[in-house]
Image: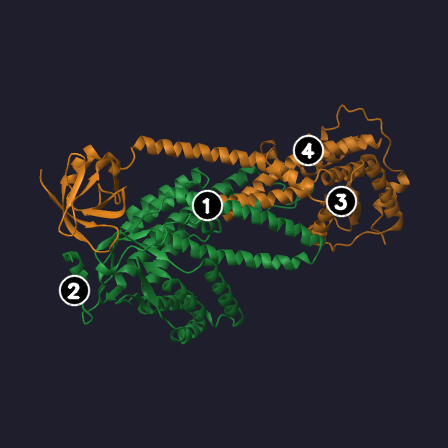
Amino acid sequence: MSDYHGSFNDGSSANRHDVSVRIDLSGLAISGDGLAQPVVWPFEELEAIDDIAKQVPFRIGCRSWPDARLTLNDQRLLADFRIHAPQLFGPPVSRRLRNVVLSIAGAGLLGASIWFGLPLASRWVASVVPIEWEVALADQFADELVKEFASMTNDEPRVCDNPDGLKALDGLIAELADAGGSPYDFNVQVIDGGLNNAFALPGGRIFIFRGLLEFAQSPDQLAAVVAHEMGHVTLQHGTTAIVQGLGISFVFSVLLGDMGGGIVAAAGEILLRMSYSREAEAEADRSAIALLQKADLKVVGLSNFFERLAEEDGDLPAALQMLSTHPSSEQRAQLTKGLEDTGRPALSDKEWQAIRDICKQ
Amino acid sequence: MGPATAATAAAGPQEPLHQFAVYDGTSGGIGKIAVTNAILGLLTLGIYRFWGKTNMRRYLWSRLTVLGDRLEYTGTPMELLLGFIVAAVAMAGLSVGFIGLEFLSARYPLFGLLMIFYLLGFYFLIFFAVFRARRYRLLRTQWRGIRFSQSGSATGYAFRAMGLMFLTGITLGLTYPYMQARLQNYRTNNTWFGNRQLTFDGKASKLFWKWVLALVLVIPTLGISFLWYKVTEFRYFASRTRFGALSFHSTLETMKIFLIYLIFAVVFGIIWFSLLEVIGVFVGDLFNIGQPGAAEPFANLSTVTIAITIAVSLVIVSLLNALQFILLIHPIVRAISETLLVKGTIDLDEIKQSDAERGGRGEGLADVLDVGAI
């Protein structure tokens, strides 16, 4: 059996020794002038440092000689290595494939547990946040948000304060709040803007735009919208969404690390928020119906309001419906169908008119 | 002493300069790893990146022949993964604290002050992480069976970096060369090969007027003067770096680096705009907010739109990652190694393995904070 020429680094000095290498029964026998005595590296302990099938020269290590390296440049050795030390050529393709499949499955599992676990965790976190914190947090961005919504219809955000209107509105709020028994103090304001919209902030602040008062045809519809927004507050949808947003951006940016998690985090957040939002809207609708029934008010206003909204904007095509943040107006219009509606009107005609005129100075 | 030692020992002090390193990586070899990493990274929600990074480093290190011998990367994916888990748990704790503070400072304005310290802490962590990651990479780099290592402390480095950054800020950037020279000093003088230390004695004063010139010209040259400065800085720093009796000299040219960036920008631009063309329809939808009846923006955004946007951004991000290796890192490593010359000798018999611990739990913090580099 012929000797091969190689060079040897012993792992303790940067110097290099010329050695001759022989294939022995149990391993590679290495000998040379620089070595005090011949060394044997057992086949099963050999490790490839380079891609030995492709690179010349190539390096080999030995597990019991941690830093020592044997550099060889004779490819005739490869035939012997294939027989005695197949591990030098890397794991077989089947094992690599299995690893890939396993890690994709693992990632799927991880994704699923985030997708389902995060909303639950956020809900729990929101539930332990003291109410005063929610109020303070909402106060921070309330003005900014009102301004943004008002600017959609080019309005200056002015809080309407006609005394008669305020009195009637406060009456309605008190009635609903008493019936609901919510731990939150509700503070409802009408903004002098043409937008047909209303929104609630964590902690109990609710904003209604003048445009919605003009759009609503009856006090029952207004009561339904207010009850819906109260549902958002009591069910802590806003706070949960904030906590969830923070959570998801953390999870994504940490998981993806320097793979550019930022963009993905932003997109993932929107996606998750939308699915959460749709559920939250439906939940707020249900809680609004329950609240109206408790307060002994007509529930049909909720359906009527959304029926009109559906006529008005035509809504999205059915295929895209399940994909937006809100349930479709048509779906929502069906909510109160078949319910016994024995409640009384929410306001007298005079009160209703006062609220509609609340922005008159 | 074997003949191999004589090969490098032959170069006496009067000898001319000779090339320090030869890089024989190919764009095909790099590309195969980069694209595999991008695809598997996407399919595994990023978990594959520890394996991908390790493969890439093994490739790059082993294609770099320094004074006749190849470098070797000895890190493992498991080390990176473990380091990541530790860092992620720590960061989760910090983030929860941050959210708590956010709520608290909404209630009690005084906590806002605490927030400032918190933000400073994050900056601190970034520098801390960069230094730790450098230590890990050095410990996992071998040449001729001898490990590199790093002394100094990550805390010390982070404090210096924060102070120098503050100084650079209040002097409106004028003392940037000082910051760079001081940090390079700390990094290099704490770098070891075996039991031997690298040394650096660069002074910011040599770079100051060049920096001023680069600043003045940054607008008329569309930022190219900044690239010129960075190349000049690199050459100067190389010339002030010593390893024993070895001294370095770089002839790297700005034009070469500029062309590399230009090609990258053009290729990336073409890909980016053709992709944007395809998804243009959907992107338009993204800004279609504030519909009546919607309680919040994005109300009419469909999941289809979002899913396509996410998919496209993911493809773009991974493509950018892969392209960076093929069109930036690969040619820059080649350009630097082709132009890095060396003079003098090292007595390889004298260099012994250091007793520095092999430890280091990977570079989790740098990964989590997105400052991982290669």
Q: Colour of chain A?
A: orange
Counting residues from the N terminus, which is met first, the one under dot 4 or under dot 3? 3
Q: Is residue A254 visible?
A: yes
Label 2 to label 3: alpha-carbon separation:
82 Å
| Closer to viewer: mark 4 or mark 3 | 3
Residue at far left of view:
A2
Label 3 Cα neighbours within 10 Å, binned few <14 / some 14-19 / many ≥20: many
Identify the image's colour scheme: rainbow, by chain, secondary structure or one colour: by chain
* Local crowd size for mark 4, using a 10 Å CA cut-off: few (<14), some (14–19), many (≥20): some
Please give the residue where the numbered disc 1 appears in the rendered image: B84
Of all chains, the one bearing label 4 is A
Marks 3 and 1 share the same chain:
no
* Residue at point 60%, 44% (across, down): A245
**Residues under numbered marks 1 and 4 in contact, where contact means CB atoms less than 8 Å apart:** no
Give coordinates of residue B297: x percent, y percent: 64, 45
Query: Which residue is denoted by mark 3 in the rendering?
Result: A204
Kindly indicate the quadrant of the structure image that contains residue B223: bottom left
Res A44 → quadrant: top left
Q: Which residue is mark 2?
A: B10
Any part of residue A237 in sight: no
> What chain is tagged by disc 3?
A
Colour of the chain lettered B: green
Q: Amino acid at mark 2?
A: Ala
- Label 1 chain ID: B
Q: Which numbered dot is residue A282?
A: 4
Q: Nearer the viewer, mark 4 or mark 2?
A: 2
Q: Up-down: is B69 above or below B217?
A: above
